[in-house]
Amino acid sequence: MIIALNNKSNLNKGEFINYLSQLNKIATKHKIILCPTFLNIPRANIENKNYLLGAQNVSSNSSGAFTGEISAEQLKEENVKYCIVGHSERRQFQKESLEEISSKIKKLQEQNIIPILCIGETKEEKEANKTIDVIKREILSAIEGQKNIEEIILAYEPIWAIGTGVIPKNEEIKKVISEIKKILPSNKVLYGGSCNENNIEELNKVTEIDGYLLGGISLKTNNLQELLLKCN
Ligand code: PGA
């Protein structure tokens, strides 16, 4: 399985160094993609060969006069192999547009960094039965004109499930993944949103899920270890 750890804007320098020493003790056969803050990326000395480095964001432009931005080229120099794109927190708080998300994917692919594209509906969209329309729109606009589309990893993250402790029913996840597969039959699909060591066994029954994108639990190494053991 692919397990992506989204640290979000957490773990100051000292905390991250301590976190990393805990993380390095967790042996796993799964592919773990650690996505720390930009500042923690160069500090991420990972000993376990199953762990790879990811970023949480990238500039939609190449290097140049774009104050405050980090380019895909710069991420590549830091050994970043994956990058989260279009997380709902960025779509909401940074007003990231569909066009920007598409440009970010292009910039990443030019540097051979694999995008992890987050898609998912709000509570209101779910209640209005618009889930499938939303995920289709987000996927189609992100992949239009891209090369190597089959390499993009999708992360289905219902916005109402992120950080809330509420997760969709397995049938709901299955339905969304089957719609994703109609557009992208060979792409890997992760599930994200309130995964923890208590609900992971239920989620694992959805055999269509190729892995998980973990937020809150990525920071709690004991709980994370328990979750990983249950994925074996
Ligand atoms: P959560 O976050 O696991 O804390 O719900 C997931 C995410 O935002 O990627």
Image: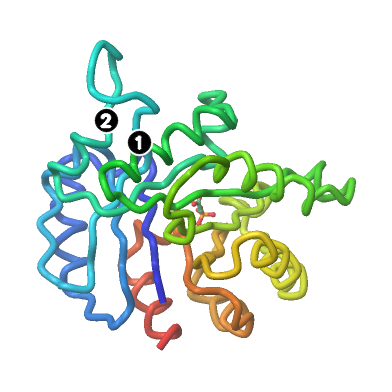
Q: Quadrant of the C terminus?
A: bottom left
Q: Residue at x 11, y 47 (%)?
A: 43
Q: Nearer the viewer, residue 156 or 204?
A: 156
Q: Is residue 124 left or right of residue 27?
A: right
Q: Residue at x 56, y 74 (%)?
A: 209
Q: Are marks 2 and 1 in contact (CB under 8 Å)?
A: yes
x then y, percent, for residue 114: 35, 53
Extreme residue toward the right, this view: 128
Residue on which disc 1 sits: 107
Q: Nearer the viewer, residue 50 or 123?
A: 50
Q: Is the residue at mark 1 in contact range of ligand 1, meaning its CB lies under 8 Å from it?
A: no
Q: Is residue 229 left or right of residue 111?
A: right
Does residue 92 lie above or below 230 as drawn? above
Q: Residue at x 55, y 45 (%)?
A: 143
Mark 2 Cα within 10 Å, few/some/many (few <14, many 20+)?
many
Q: Quadrant of the N terminus?
A: bottom left
Disc ID at residue 175: none
Q: How far apart are the alpha carbons under marks 2 and 1?
A: 8 Å
Mark 1 Cα within 10 Å, few/some/many (few <14, many 20+)?
many
x then y, percent, for residue 121: 71, 47
Say which element carries label 2.
loop
The kind of residue tagged 2 is: Ser
Q: Earlier in the sequence, mark 2 or mark 1?
A: 2
Residue on which disc 2 sits: 71
Q: Is residue 231 left or right of residue 173?
A: left
x then y, percent, for residue 206: 63, 80
Give the image quarter of residue 39.
top left
